Structure formats: C-alpha cells, structure tokens
Image (cartoon, rainbow, N blue to C red):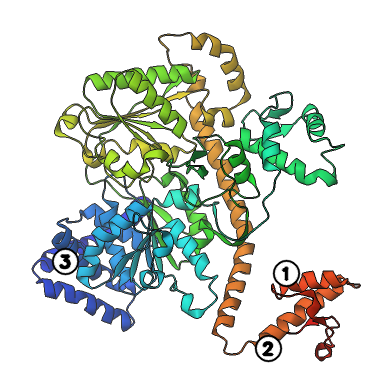
Amino acid sequence: MNKRVLKRYMRITDQIVSLLPKFKELSDGQLQAKTIALKTQLAAGHTLKEVLIEAYATAAEADRRVLGLTPYNEQILGAVALEYNNVAEMKTGEGKTLTATMPMYLHGLTGPGNFLITANDYLADRDAAQMGQVYSWLGVSTASGVAKPGHEDDERDKQDIYSHDIVYTTNSTLGFDYLLDNLAANQSDLYIRPFRFALLDEVDAILLDMAQMPLIISGAPRAQSNLFEPAEALMSIMTPKVDFEQSDDNKKAWFTPTGIRRMNTYFDVDDILSEEHANLYRHMVLALEAHFLYVKDRDYVADNDKVALLDLANGRELSGMHLEAGLHQAIEAKEHVKLSAPTRAMASITYQNLFRMFPQLAGMTGTAKTDAAELRETYNMDVVVIPTHQPTIRVDRPDHLFVTNEEKIIASLKEVQKAYKQHRPVLIETGSVSMSNLYSRLLLSAGIPHNLLNARSAAKEAKIVATAGRVGAVTVATSMAGRGTDIILDKETVAMGGLLVIGTERMTSERVDNQLRGRAGRQGYPGQSVFYVSLEDRVVIENSPKWVKKYRKKHAPEAVVATDPQPLRQHRFHKLVLRAQQNVTKTQRGARFQTLEFDEVFRVQREYIYRMRSEVMNAGQLNEQVIQVLKTATFNFSHQKKHQEMMEIADFILNSIDYSFTPNELVNHREYSDVKCPIIVR
C-alpha cells in the first residue's frame, strides 16, 4: 500500500519540481504576488488540493531565496503526503522543519486557525522565528504561541497570537488556551479562532504516548488536608512484605492485615477500614502509592521546594502538570517539600479529543509505522514512509543482554571507554534522570569528560545535542525523542565510522528505541547503535513471564561477582525484550481506546456547555435564561429535600445561585408559586 500511495504522491511531486525552474526566473515581486493569486483562486471556490502544486512550488522557491535552503524531492514528497491527512515517517535529519513550510503556507492562505505543534517551547519559538521569515516574505502572517524565554505565560497577547494565519505552538499551550478561552466570561475575552489545520511534529509522542494525559484547568482551591504528613510519617517506617506487599511487576501495592493493625494502633482508631475513617485510610493508600509506585528521578524530580512530573518519553519536566486526587500532595509529603494547594477542576480535555476537533490533521515523526493501525483507527491518518535522501548505512548491532544491571553497566562503560580512546563521539541514552546521573558519576570516575542532558539541564539542550557529534564528545541523555536539533558530525567523526549510540535499556516502546537509533546515520552518514539490556530493567520486570524472575533470582548472585560480564546467548532470551515491549504496547493501546470511549461522553457534555456559554455571552438580555435556570435548580432541590431546614436552603443558594448570599435575605416569594420553593430575591 505504501508503494501505491507513494507512486501517486510522486506524480504530484514531479509536477511541483517541474515548476521550480520557471519560478526561479520570477522576480521577488512576481513570486510574492502568487499569494494574492492563490487566495483569489480559493475565494472563487477552488480547493486547497487544486492549488497545491502552485502553492508548494511557491513555498519551495521562497525557502531557497529567504533561507538559502532548497527542499529535496523527498521533502516535497513528504509535504505532499501531509496534505492528504497522513503521518509522514521521515527519519531523523531528513529536514522535517523545512518540509512543514509547504503545507503550512498552503493552509495559511485560508486565514487564522492553522497550527504547527512542536515538542517544546524552545522549538516553537525558534521555528516560528526562522520559518516565519518565509511566510512573512510571502505575505502570510505567523506567530509563536508560547511565552518568550524569561517571560510569564500570562504576558502573551493571545488576541494577537491567534489572529495570525499560522501559529507555532506546543500541544499543552494550545490545549490550555482552548480551555481558558471556553471559560471566558465576556465576548471580548475570546481569542481562539475556528480550528482549520494542525500539523503535529513528533505526532506519535503527542497522539500516542501522551494521548491519555488530561489537561486540567484548576479553579477555586479546596481546603488543605492535614493528613498527608501523618500518613507519610507512618509510611516511612512501615516494613515491606510485612506491612504491605507489591506485585511482581511493581505496578500495584497493598496493605497486609499486619499493616492494617499497625495503622489502627498508630492512629488510635478501632477500625481504619470503617466508613468513619475512610478519609484517613485514603491518605494512607496515597502515601503507599507515592512511596512505591512513583520513583524519584524517573517519574518526577524534586527541586526548588516543589515536585515536577517528568515526561517518560523524553525526560523533560511537565511544566504545570499535577497528579490528581491528592496523589501529588502525597509525593510532596514524601519529599518533604511544601504542599501545593489542592484545587477543583474547572475544565479538562485530553490530547485525543483536542486534536480530533480539527477538520484536517497531519503529522511528522521519525518512527510511526509500528503504530500505524492505531493511528488509522483513532485519527483516520495513514502512515506513509518517505524514502531517505541518501541511503541509510547505519549499523544496528544486536542487543547485549545480561542478568543484572551491574553487569550491564560495567559492559556498557567498557564500550564507552573503547570509543573514547579512539576519539569517536558517543551518545549514551538512559531511561531515567537517576540512571543518567549514575552514568555521569561513573564516567567522571573513569576520567571521561562529558555532557549531561536530562530534566535538570533542559535549558542547554539544543547546544548539547548539536555538539554531540564532535570528535571525542561523550553525551549522556535521557530518552532522545523529540529533541528537534540535529547532531552535526565532524569530518574526522565520519572517517572513524560516525556517531556511536548506546542505549542502556530498552524503553517501553520499540518506536522510542528506533528514535534513539535514528540519532546516528542521518543523511547517509555512517553510524552505529547498540543496546545494553538486563533482566532487571523495568520493561523486563513488569512485562516478562514468571520463569524470567526465577532465572534472575537464581543467577543474580553469581553475576554480581563477575569482573568480566558476558552477555546471555541462549536462544530463549533472543526475543525476550521485544515480547515484553509488545505486551506493553498492547496494554497501552487498550487503555487509550478505553480512555477515548469515556472521553466521548465528556466531549458531548463539554461541547454542549461551551455552546450554551457562547449563547449566553452573545445574548442581549438574559432575564428569561436566568429565570429558567432558577426554576430548574430550585425545582430539583425542592423535590430532593421535601423538608428543608433554613441552613440547607441557605447552603443551596450560596453554592448554586449567589455566593454573596446571607441567610437573613431568605423570603417566600409568591411570584414563582409554581416552583413551590423559597426563592432568593435581592
């Protein structure tokens, strides 16, 4: 199917390429006039696909004149695939940023409502500035939707940003802005324009890895519980396998009868499992989860007296993200930092629902074919694999699998030392901040200078990645997905075989591993990749058969004392990790579909409420609507509580109708006798 589709898109690409010599002869004014001509055609009823060839040729020639970059045929082919609602799989280094200028220019001709979604604020701001030169030169407006470095988010002029034809932003920024726009109280506070087109860079990370992550706008704070600290104090002295137990995959934990009795004694209660003490027991469960299901420097970091969640796909901090239902406060209590205020959720949406709202959607990534079926079923997007501009000559070596983490680390460090002596650049990938810090300390002990890239050094990310291909460079990084910056190789590096990529564990998805491999061998350059894996890695422990656990327990003691660890070579270990990853992928896919089904209910409710809010804001007089709401609310209340006490009525009015109400204002008002309930009058 990929070949048939590519053949059709190549015919369109050939037509675009055939126009380029002609467009190259045009003056600047003549080329810029193409924008007005194309807009005229669209206004006359032509579709975007009917003007695609001329628009793409215009953008490609503008790229050459403004940026000095002429798109390769493969980049034009990728751009064509994007316009037909596809995910273009383009390998790392193939120039996705330049590819995006063509479909973004085409859709920019239609006016505001077009977005390019990037991996982080830095990339959104950088690409808006660089690629924006092309759009501006052609007469199409563009803006960065994220806050400027060193500025607060609320300093953004959202009215101005969303009035532009093209907006470069991040998925979280757009999501929160959408929610806030729909919480506006006045028409003048609205800024989001109707959605037209979204092009997602690293589309698999957004629509798959982060699909279930809800964006939540928090409002009025709840009263802070004073039970987090006592629960943490007890949890910190409870004994594993005595007071509580964990599942073999470390995904669940529960209290034992011994632990229950200990809690009863500690808190001096008869039965902590009774309804009377349900809230206290809930805090103990939260403390248990915080202690043993959430790992510091893997799931979160604790810095500057706060807890920040980590994106498992790339190790970055998830700014503004908090766990719900008190779990975040339980982790804060565990880390002995100031407890953040618990808040009420005012509005929420998942990325699945956010991007399904766009009438046209496309995406780019280096790895998507492994999840093509889910992208097609959920988002109606096919994956089209775009050929590389130069043949890929990277060598992907087989995994080295060991029993213990210690063996794996020793063996991988020997590989690094060997490459360092040859002055060959090395990129070492780890699955967590703590593991990256461990490798950093071990490299320092071995006298090997290096750069460290994780959640604690994100500000230097672009510079660290760009210099990772220099002679003698050693870089330690958490997952390299969505970095958005190419690794540039020295000539000497190319001569000695290119960049060596070492993975210190397999991630939960084969797709993420392939993203790491793609850091070497870009644009036809040589390179190598190899993974060092152990039976103690998280993906193996949580998703492998029981015999693996038995084998690990039996052979771990003898493996620990090995000074020259040897990888496992038995046939049954050959596909162990791949099967474990497939189990994770299957489980995650099922969870995403379940979330989507639940989300459909919320989507219908959300759209109804937002539509009603819009009607209220646009209404000239609200008397009839307010009276109807009052009648409905008081009717429901009066039928639920036949014999109301004065304070019950006051509480209802205070929470449902008028927060400034005082009880002495209650009167019986006869005008609404059909409601048969006391009504507040001012």
Q: Quadrant of residue 479?
A: top left
What numbered label is drawn on residue 655? Answer: 1
For disc 3, the marked residue is: 19
Against 610, residue 537 (above or below) is above
Front: mark 1 or 2: 1
Residue 487, can we see it? yes
Q: Amino acid at mark 2?
A: Glu
Q: Amino acid at mark 1?
A: Asn
Q: Amino acid at mark 3?
A: Leu
For disc 2, the marked residue is: 624
Give the CA distance from mark 2 to mark 3. 61 Å
* Tag 3 near tag 1, CB within 8 Å: no
Q: Position of residue 221 (x, y in %)?
A: 63, 58
Decide which of tag 3 and tag 1 comes sooner along the chain. Answer: 3
Residue at (34%, 35%) from the top-left corner?
517
* Tag 2 near tag 3, CB within 8 Å: no
Q: Secondary structure at mark 1?
A: helix
Residue at (75%, 84%) from the top-left corner?
681
Q: Is residue 672 left or right of residue 130?
A: right
